[in-house]
Image (cartoon, grey):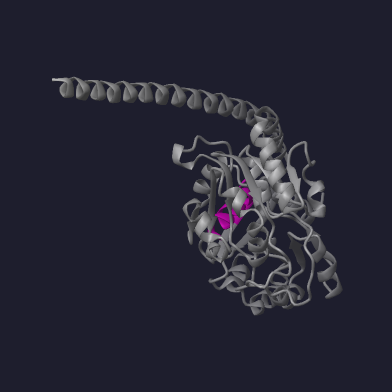
Amino acid sequence: MATKRRRRRIRKGKVARSLRGEARGRVDGFRLGWQHGHWYGQCESVLQNTAQTQTFAVRQAHVLFVATGKGFPYSPLDEAIANALRAQVTQLTITDTLQPVAEIAMRIRPDIVIVLDGLQFNVAQADAMRAAGIRTAIWFTDDPYYTDITSGIAPHYDEIFTLELVCVDYYRRLGCPNVYYLPLGADPASFRPRNPLRSQRHDICFIGSAYWRRVEFFNEVTKFLATKDTHISGIWWERLKDFQLMKSKIELGRWMGPDETANMYNGAKIVINMHRAHDDETFNNNSAGIGAISPNPRTFEISACAALQLTDVRSDLVSFYTPDVDIVTYSSPQELIDKIQYYLAHEEERKAIAMRGMYRTMREHTYGKRIERLLAILFPG
């Protein structure tokens, strides 16, 4: 009899603990949902205040846009730029580098042919268009990492755009007279405040490939990140010295599309950004050793999601954001650790910086703004 009573007490205790756990879960879930809903509402209010900055004049021009034709992960970039052009010119024709572009251009006679990336586009087609009196432009999207290749491409175009400031003088020294600095940006259709799944919420997030210089850096912070709610996604992360320590926190060997990437950024309290080193030995065609001082596209995409961004320092970053105001920088593994600890413990300060970063991105660094600048250069006045 005593044994039966003891068993009943044990069962009742388990049921009571289970009910208390469910109650706590409902309370915690409600609190998390309310907090994110409130934050999401604040973001939407800020976005409404930037809407007027994304209304553009339409230029009387016919543009032939030559997309990369590379497929994913370049296809979202092709689409974002095509959409921005579509909203700002009276006539847009779209093709890609796999098509007979010169033949198309000679038939429709556009005011300008804009080639994106162009690494897989035969320069003979660019020469043929120029010989026929058709103006051409190219926008390099991976400088300076492929300058061994782009150095042979650039002289075949009338106008050169590059996302790396250092490369402006580099192309001019090659004899290209019309070279302009035009970074990439954020596509608000994908990178914006969102309501991610619970499984996509983490304290710390990093998305990107494990180039060797990144691995060297992350080897210094692995033990710290292993103690946190960290999520890393990308290829080659098995290169980490303590990969087994981080294995459960790494989604290995997978490319995420823009929407899923944006959800991961939105679900993180802190998103780490680390630029690719100009002299990294992984897939590098930069034998001239041209440096890199300009922000990468992730800089704009992370900030567009109203996530606090911790980025390594690039000297031209200050042309786009103000450190400690709308973005936060680090210059060493220990500084990264210190700032992660600080901003995880100072939620309101973290959110305020993230909100300002989103506001500035949506005002100044969308693809609409980049195309507005490109067209102003190509068609002044």
Residue in the picture at 71% in, 73% down? 150
Name the dominant secondary structure of the magenta segment: helix
- The magenta region covers 74-92
Identify the residue at the far front of this view: 2
Residue 204 or residue 366, whichever sits in front = 204
Q: Position of residue 53 (x, y in %)?
A: 71, 36
Residue 78 among magenta residues = yes
Residue in the picture at 64% in, 67% down? 212
Residue 315 or residue 217, whichever sits in front = 217
From the viewer's perspective, is residue 216 above or below residue 28? below
Q: Position of residue 367 (x, y in %)?
A: 66, 48
In the rendered image, which quarter is residue 154 located in? bottom right
Q: Is residue 232 left or right of residue 128?
A: left
From the viewer's perspective, is residue 322 above or below residue 34? below
**Is residue 89 visible to the viewer in this orientation of the structure?**
no
Residue in the picture at 44% in, 21% down? 27
